Image (cartoon, rainbow, N blue to C red):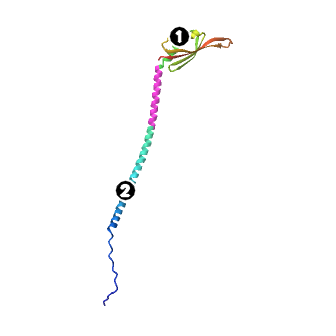
Amino acid sequence: MIRINLLPVKRKKKPKPIPGFIIATVIATVIVLVGVLFTYVNIKEEVKSLQARKASNEQKLQEMKKKLKALENYETLVKSVERKKGVILQLRKNQGVPVRLMDELSRNLPNGIWLKGLKVKGNLVDIEGYAFTNSDVVKYVNRLKKSSLFNSVYLAESKRKEISEGGTKEKIPVYNFKIKLGIRI
C-alpha cells in the first residue's frame, strides 16, 4: 500500500545567518574583556610589587633614621669635645695670668691699703678695698697704671666710711674704694 500524505508538511526553514556586525561585536567584546582582564592582572601584580617595595623602603627608612640619630649624637659629642678642648687650650694659655695678676697687685700695694674683694671676668678685673687716706688710693691707682700687665685702670669709686675695729666701740675713718682695670694677655 502506498500512502500519500496530502497534508501540508511543515518544512524546516533554513536559519537565517547571524549578521556580521553582531559577530564582530561579540568578537570585539571578547577581545576587550581579555584585554581588560590582562590589564587588571598586570595592575594588580604591579600594586603588589609596589606595596612590597614600599614596605622595604619603610624598613630602610627606619634603619636610616636610627643611623641618622646615632650620627647626630656623634656630632653633638664631637662638638662637646671640641668645646672642652678649646676651654682646656684657653686655660693652658691663661694659666699664668692669675699668678701674674696677684703678683702685680700685691707688688704695687702701698702701706695703708688692704683689699676686700677681687673679681675677674675675662680680661676685666674689679678690685674693692679700704685705705686709711685717699692719697693712698690715688698712689695705688697710679702704680697700677704704670704696670705693663694692665691696659686700662680707673678709680670707679672712693667713699669715706667709718668702721669699728674688733670688739671696740671706737670707729676708724677709712676710704672704701673700687678700681676697675683691664688685663693685657
Q: CA distance from mark 1 to mark 2?
A: 99 Å
Q: Main secondary structure of the magenta part?
A: helix
Q: Nearer the viewer, residue 158 or 169?
A: 158
Magenta range is 69-93
Residue at the far left: name it: 2
Rendered location of residue 137, percent (x, y): 57, 11
* Left or right: 77, with 167 as reference point: left
Badge 2: how crowded within 10 Å, few (<14), some, or many (20+)? few
Name the kind of residue labelled 2 in the image. Answer: Thr
Residue at 53% of width from left, 10% of height from top? 142
Closer to the chain start, of discs 1 and 2, is 2
Q: Is residue 12 above or below residue 127?
A: below
Residue identified by numbered label 2: 39
Rendered location of residue 22, percent (x, y): 34, 67
Residue identified by numbered label 1: 142
Is residue 76 within the magenta segment? yes
Q: Is residue 107 visible?
A: no
Q: Is residue 185 above or below residue 57?
A: above
